[in-house]
Every structure is written in C-alpha cells, then in structure tokens.
Amino acid sequence: MTGASSGLGAALAGCYAARDATLALIARHRERLHAVAKAFPRAVPYCADVRDGAAMSAVARDFIDRFGPPDVVIANAGVSTGTLTEYPEDVERFQTVLDINVMGLVKTFHPFLAAMREAGRGTLAGIASVAGVRGLPGAGAYSASKAAAIAYLESLRVELRGTGIRVVTVCPGYIATPMTARNPYRMPFLLSADEAARRIVRAIDAGRRVATIPWQMAIVARILAVLPPALYDALLARAPRKPRGNLG
C-alpha cells in the first residue's frame, strides 16, 4: 500500500491489519511511516517515493522474496493543490501532481505484475477520484491526474482480463484527511478516513470494477458527466476553489 503514512492510507492499513494481514506500507515520510507501522505487528515499512521506479522495484522484490506475490496492491499515494495555468510557479506543480497521481500508479503496479501473473491471482486497486469526472476550476492538475488515473485503470483492467488479476478503480468523494483539511468550501457527503477505508475494502473484496464512494457521490458524478458543456461552465464558473500553494 502506498501513501500509507497518514490519512486514508493509514486507515486502509488498519482495516487489513485487523484481518491479520501482512502489510507492506510504503510512503515518503519516514518518521510518520514508521509510527504507523509500529501500530501493526505484521507491517513492514518501506520508505520510497512512487515517482522512483527503481525504489518501487526494490520494494516489490524484497516483499515478494519474503512473502510471495501480494493478494492486493493498493496504489493510494496522491497529492492535491490548487493550480492555475497562468502562474509560472504552478507549471512545476502540475508536473508533480501528474507524476505522483498518474505515473505513481504505473510504478506501483509494474514491479508486482509478473509475480501476480505467474500466480494467476491478486487485485490491483487504484485510488482515483470523483474529481476526475469533469475538470474542476482551480484544480486543473488534480482533475487531469484523476481523469488519467480512471482511464489508465480501465485500460489495465481490460488488458488483464482472463489472467486472474482483478483491477478495481476507486473513486472517492470527500474524505476527511490532511489533503482536504485546507478546502475552504463545504464538502458534501464527507466521510471520515476510517469509514471510507471500510467501504473501499468492501469494494475491493467484492472485486468491483469501479466503485464510487459514498454512493451519493456516484449520483453526483453521473449528473456531472452528462451536463452539457455550456451548462457545466455556467454552474462551475463561480465555484469556490482549492487554495494554491503547498502540495497536500
């Protein structure tokens, strides 16, 4: 599991630890990661950045050598910040968001796939977002990254059909984590990280191809998807925006 040092990742780790699962917890922030891992007796912490393909391959080799192919790989690492194309300093933020939220998925799954194919089983679960359904003003990098994540996971699901490996696309709405703590607007159907994690684990267990959580956000996503562009533009033009600044 990537992004395991806080928020949803730590909550997901707790869900699987309650099943006595062996956990590979991956995150960039060493101190926070080790603090989370200490809470679970069968957790192995790996300090790695999902943008670093060599580091992620080393994690996979170590885990597979010690424990065999994983039953579930959850690509949860992600970042968000407000971005505006007109600001030069936001160009680099666009790159960082896309690298972590999109290429991070690829570099998380890739090193496990050969062993999972040989075993003929397992689940790859990617955390996308309802924000990938339509482009949100002021969040171009985040919306673009999550739209790309949804499309990538769909491609991967079809590619792996018949191999015994399932691919689950998880599209959460708002979850109370450090990432959303700075949002200066009302967040409808907000879930705690623990409740979101429980629902996500149930979706993974069920092998759902696409799971939008909570169900109310699935309705919102369907409505947004079919709104004509002119109406969507008029409705969202004055919507509050996520602050620009540090990645979270």
Image (spheres, helix red, strand yellow):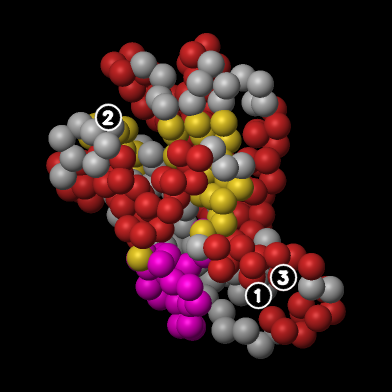
Instruction: Please provide percent x and percent y for residue 220.
Output: 64, 70
Relative to residue 13, is residue 24 depicted above or below?
A: above
The quarter of the rendered structure image containing the C terminus is bottom left
The quarter of the rendered structure image containing the N terminus is top left
Mark with earlier residue (3, 1): 1
The range drawn in magenta is 172-191
Disc 2 designates what residue? Answer: 22
Residue 101 appearing in the image? no
SS type, badge 2: loop
Sort mark 3 into few (<14), some (14-19) or many (20+) by Cα contacts within 10 Å. Answer: few
Main secondary structure found in the magenta portion: loop
Q: Of all residues shown, which one is farthest toward the front?
A: 206
Identify the residue at image location x=79%, y=68%: 226
Which image quarter: residue 193?
A: bottom left
SS type, badge 3: helix
Q: Which circle, 3 or 2, is nearer the viewer?
A: 3
Disc 3 designates what residue? Answer: 223
Disc 1 designates what residue? Answer: 137
Identify the residue at image location x=61%, y=47%: 210
163 with respect to 111 (left or right): right
The residues bearing labels 3 and 2 have C-alpha atoms spaced at a distance of 40 Å
